[in-house]
Image (cartoon, rainbow, N blue to C red):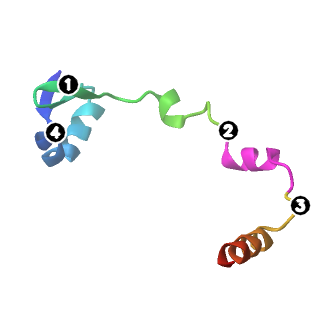
Amino acid sequence: MRELSVREARAELAGLLDAVEAGEEIVITRRGVPVARLTQTTAHSAARSDFPSRKALREQLPQAKTPAHEVIRELRASAII
């Protein structure tokens, strides 16, 4: 496990990602205190399969009764008063 300051991590980000890909764990510190850990992602967490697709979420929403452009016009008109 390697420790780096925020400043060093910024300067070496591409190299750090290569090291993490190779299996190394990196700890980033701020004023000597650990604040973040870079580790390899697993296939499951990288895919984020636990989140539904945006399309599926949109399909679950009820149909709007008033088109969005009309709602915006009404809001703009009421703000001008």
Which tag, 2 or 3, sits closer to the chain's start? 2
**What is the span of residues highlighted in magenta in the rendered image?**
53-63
Decide: marks 2, 4 in contact (CB < 8 A)?
no
Give the residue number, with chain letter if any, for mark 4.
Answer: 6
Give the residue number, with chain letter if any, for mark 1.
Answer: 34
Which tag, 2 or 1, sits closer to the chain's start? 1
Give the residue number, with chain letter if any, for mark 3.
Answer: 65
- Kindly report which numbered mark, 2 or 1, lies closer to the viewer in this rendering: 1
Identified by mark 3, the residue type is: Lys
Question: Which residue: 67% across, 48% down?
Answer: 54
Q: Main secondary structure of the magenta part?
A: helix
Q: CA distance from mark 1 to mark 4?
A: 10 Å
Which tag, 3 or 4, sits closer to the chain's start? 4
Question: Which residue: 86% across, 65% down?
Answer: 66
Q: CA distance from mark 3 to mark 1?
A: 52 Å
Identified by mark 2, the residue type is: Pro
In the displayed structure, does residue 81 sit left or right of residue 71? left
Identified by mark 4, the residue type is: Val
SS class, disc 4 = helix
Which tag, 1 or 4, sits closer to the chain's start? 4
- Kindly report which numbered mark, 3 or 4, lies closer to the viewer in this rendering: 3
